[in-house]
Image (tube, rainbow, N blue to C red):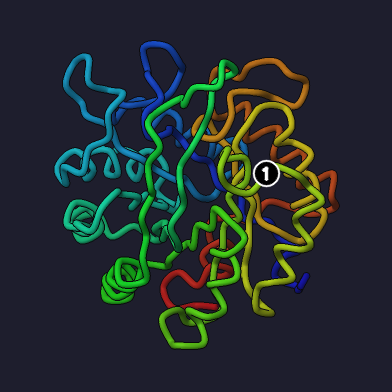
Amino acid sequence: MYHPSMDKAVVTCALTGVLTDPERFPVPVTPTQMADAAEQAWNAGASVVHCHFRMQEPGRGAFPTWDPDVVETICDAIRERCPEILINMSTGVFGNDISGPVACLERVRPEVAALNSGSLNYLKTRKNGSWAWPPMLFDNPVDKVSRFITKMDELGIVPECECFDTGIVRSIPMFESVGLLKPPTHVSLVMGVASGMPAKAEWLPLLVNELSDGTHWQAIVIGRTEVWDVHRACAEQGGHVRTGLEDTFYLPDGTKADNNGALIEALVKCVRDAGREPATADEARAILGVGGSA
């Protein structure tokens, strides 16, 4: 499935996670911190930033928010600091009510938005055999996915189909065949979630083979140093690439990164070692079809 547009790799930085505690980990939360992190990523070679948004009240920075005023303030700070960079906004929410993410999409109109493309039992266990958290269902039925797609189409936002398991990957061509998604589709293979696909490089060719020809794909790899084998394979096989403090705190040598720029520098090295170059912002727009280009 390698094609010429993949000679350039779109490099995405996932600036901050969903619930990572900023009092314990070096994740950005405030508008200034998010803009600083975006600038670090941009200077290191990223053309896209994937954004979650946090509550701004003191002591609440570990919790997500769908307050459009907060989201707009953060995105404005990023755009002011890095005018060319593409914003990829998270839309992940449990349950049927998507009004929060939709209000933020309408307010900010990011170039790209995550589209969680199927449901997953979100599980993790501790070494003592107990659940790390109460078992939960990250529910993304077709009706919910369809409503997100309809809104993204209305706003001219490119969906990034996040696939946490093999059945979700195989659903993407079905969404295309019934007209929900308009090829070429942008797919993220989410690897390393404990109850989803493992972070194993040898899985990549099998997963990509399930996608339609011409699909743009990247690996989102959650974990420690094992993520870098997948990143290298992804770059070598023509995929786009993503890392950041949402996905890992670990550099290839096992040391901890204290900022997003260091992780993106390591990811860009993977891209160049594979004989490719990071896409510029304009090239990323063309590859992903932002603004109607393909």
Q: Residue at x 46, y 24 (%)?
A: 132
Residue 29, image x and y in percent?
Answer: 33, 26
Q: Residue at x 68, y 56 (%)?
A: 9
Q: Is residue 200 visible?
A: yes
Is residue 146 found left or right of 247 in the rendered image?
left
Furthest-bottom residue in view?
178
Q: Residue at x 37, y 49 (%)?
A: 90
**Which quadrant holds residue 194?**
top right
Position of the N terminus, as image quadrant, is bottom right
Q: Nearer the viewer, residue 290 or 51?
A: 51
Residue 291, image x and y in percent?
Answer: 41, 73
- Asked if residue 88 is positioned above or below residue 54 in the image, the reply reads below
Is residue 196 found left or right of 29 in the rendered image?
right
Residue 215, image x and y in percent?
Answer: 63, 73
Position of the C terminus, as image quadrant, is bottom right
Q: Residue at x 16, y 21 (%)?
A: 57
**Which quadrant holds residue 117?**
bottom left
**Which quadrant holds residue 73?**
top left
Q: Given the image, on which type of amino acid does mark 1 rest?
A: Pro
Which residue carries the number 1 mark? 198
Within 10 Å of disc 1 (Cα), the crowding (few <14, some 14-19, many 20+) is some
